[in-house]
Amino acid sequence: MTRTRPVATIKDVAALAGCSATTVSHVLNDAPGTRVKNSTREKVRAAARELAYSPNLLARGVRQHRTNTLGLVSDAVGTTPHAVRIILGAQHAATEAGYLLMSMNAGLNADLASREIKSLLDRRVDGILYAADYHRLVDLPPNLEGIPALLINSRSVDRRVTSVAPDELGGALAAVRELTANGHRRVGYLTEVSDIPATKLRMDGYRRALKEAHIRFNPDMVAHQSSNTPGGNRAAAALLDRPHRPTALFCFNDRMAMGAYQAAAQRGLHIPRDLSIVGFDNQENIADALQPPLTTAELPHYDMGYWGVNTLLDMINKPGGVSTAEHTVLPCPLIRRASVGPPPGSAPVGAVAGTELPAPTRPDDRELASSGGGSSSLDPTGLRYP
């Protein structure tokens, strides 16, 4: 019969190392300001390894009023292929900080989200992240107020909670700049019909890029459809069947870009020889799988999750509690592939496929990409920009 090895205690480690339990605690917790000889530190660590000693994190948490756990409640993030990278980024940041991340998926059920938050609070998590699968405004569950909390890929309607979202405007600006830099003057836009932040901000980026290139905005070069592949096909068809069709298309997302590819093929147009296309999202199994591979602006899902955990931990550890809520946007870098070329009959401008460009500069020439996030003054769109 196999005997179960008894669980070692801190006193067992102290006895084997020939020191006090307090010294063991100082060594294994890397307590600052303690004077312990290097030889004693080595004995303590060797004894802990030999006895397979593991500190009692629950007891430590009681003493420090911490559990070293965070909660993440999401709508459909856990079931959305590209947005799931929010969870991955959050997990990596939590692990690096020595925290455990407890993730729950509520779908779009507000009552379920409130119950999940209550369950996490009952387990004394140190803070909660609330993530959305797409950038939108959210009404906070009432039980999320008054605790360290942070919103990812969203913003609270009352703006009372710190949040992070993609730089939709900057990503669109970079995407359309790529087309105008290659010589295109007739740039169409296939956009979404829903009233969400990305719809307005990406349109603002499109119009700003045209203005920069001294191209007059023409509403007839914009087609509104549902943001899926059939919608992209219909929107592209409406523009490509015009007498003076666009030589390039900027698409609200990669699924609409896929529909634009279909519409181009149905009309015998070759990409990028006859038509250049840029998407948005950098959605896996679409952007890199299309032929030719799609140039697109990448949503920073992983970065938002990673940034969110680190910022939440800063809030938790800040003396005096949580500071004033701020909204931060993270860059949407342009991923260059092979769907952009010069207009038909023009000489190539010379862009290398397969490279990543930083987010564009703002009108005041400050570099967004070099800031690493953060918050500053309000942009005219109402969002904060570095």
Image (tube, grey):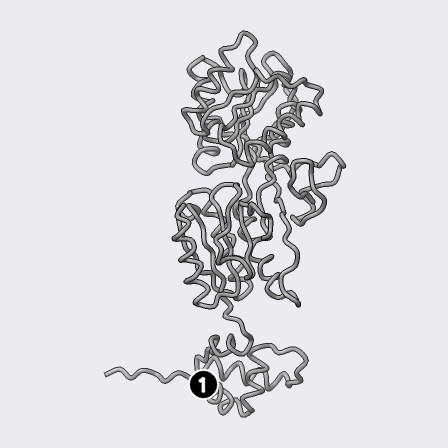
What residue does disc 1 label? Answer: 9
Q: Position of residue 305 (x, y in %)?
A: 53, 51
Q: Position of residue 114 (x, y in %)?
A: 43, 55
Q: Residue at x 69, y 45 (%)?
A: 386
In the current view of this chain or complex, which residue is farthest to the right?
364
Q: Residue at x 51, y 29 (%)?
A: 294
Quarter holding the N terminus is: bottom left
Q: Position of residue 95 (x, y in %)?
A: 51, 62
Q: Quadrant of residue 51?
A: bottom left
Above/below status of 244 relative to 298: above
> Residue 190 vs residue 311: left or right?
left
| Residue 323 vs residue 301, the one in the foreground | 323
Image position of 51 with respect to 303: above or below: below
Where residue 153 sits in the image (x, y, percent)? 53, 45
Q: Specify the farthest residue to the top.
A: 243
Q: Farthest residue to the left: give it.
A: 1
In terms of secondary structure, where does tag 1 sit?
Answer: loop
Mark 1 neighbour class, 10 Å CA radius: few under 14, some 14 to 19, many 20 or more: some
Q: Nearer the viewer, residue 206 or 195?
A: 195
Residue sitting at 61 percent across and 11 percent down?
345
Residue 201 versus residue 42 in the image, above or below: above
User: Which residue type carries mark 1?
Assistant: Thr
Left or right of residue 17: residue 346: right
| Residue occupying the point 71% across, 20% down | 214
